[in-house]
Structure formats: structure tokens, C-alpha cells
Image: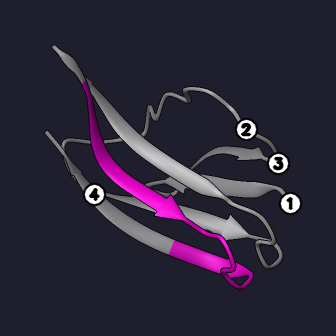
Amino acid sequence: MPVTVSVNGTWVGQWDENTGWIPLDSVVQGKNELMVELPSAAKGQVTIDVLAKRTGGDVSLLRMNFQAKAAGKYAYTFVAR
């Protein structure tokens, strides 16, 4: 099932399998909106992690698990400094 992701209204990508790091160039300092669209109900594990690269390691900003979620659009907010 392809999952579509956008940040602050800018399309980031669409994936139907595991992928590595995807730069989120449309992230701004302050409040950001991440939109995830599921075209059908999630039958397996669908997890999205939003991480920030910082000196000394990565910082988790947001972690979402869509397992058993219904089809639809899901909006989340996170703050970047």
C-alpha cells in the first residue's frame, strides 16, 4: 500500500516499502504540519519516524504507527528549532 507524505503542504514522496532517510526540505523553524495519506486500511505495520540531526546524534521529533488505521488523511504537528 503506497503511503503519501507531505510537509507544510509540500509533497515529500510516496512509498510502498521500507526506505531510508528522506530530507524534509520544506520544514521551517517553528511549527510544522506533516500530512500522511493512507489510500486503504493498513494491513501490516506502517511506521513513520521524523528525526532531526543534531550534534551528538539524532533526536526523535515524531513517531507514528498506522497499523490497523483506516484509509484517510492524518495530520500531525511538530516543532523544529
Secondary structure under badge 1? loop
In the rendered image, residue 69 lying in the magenta stretch gets the answer yes
Instruction: Give the quadrant of residue 72.
Output: bottom right
Q: Are marks 3 and 1 in contact (CB under 8 Å)?
A: yes
Q: Are marks 3 and 2 in contact (CB under 8 Å)?
A: no
Give the residue type that dot 2 points to: Asn
Q: Earlier in the sequence, mark 3 or mark 1?
A: 1
Real-space Cα separation, disc 1 to disc 2, in angstroms:
11 Å
Secondary structure under badge 4? strand
Real-space Cα separation, disc 4 to disc 2, in angstroms:
22 Å
Q: Foreground residue, 54 or 31?
A: 54
Give the residue type that dot 3 points to: Asp
What residue sits right under mark 3 in the picture? 16
The x and y percentages for residue 80 are 21, 44
- In the rendered view, does 25 fall on the left or right side of 12? left
The x and y percentages for residue 76 are 40, 68
Say above or below: 32 vs 77.
above
Whether residue 54 is visible to the viewer of this picture, yes or no, is: no
Q: Give the number of the mark in front: 4 or 1.
A: 1
In the rendered image, residue 62 lying in the magenta stretch gets the answer yes
- In the rendered view, does 15 fall on the left or right side of 6? right
Q: On residue 1, which mark appears?
A: 1
- In the rendered view, does 78 fall on the left or right side of 20? left
Magenta region, residue range: 58-74
Q: Earlier in the sequence, mark 3 or mark 4?
A: 3
Secondary structure under badge 3? loop
Give the residue type that dot 4 points to: Phe
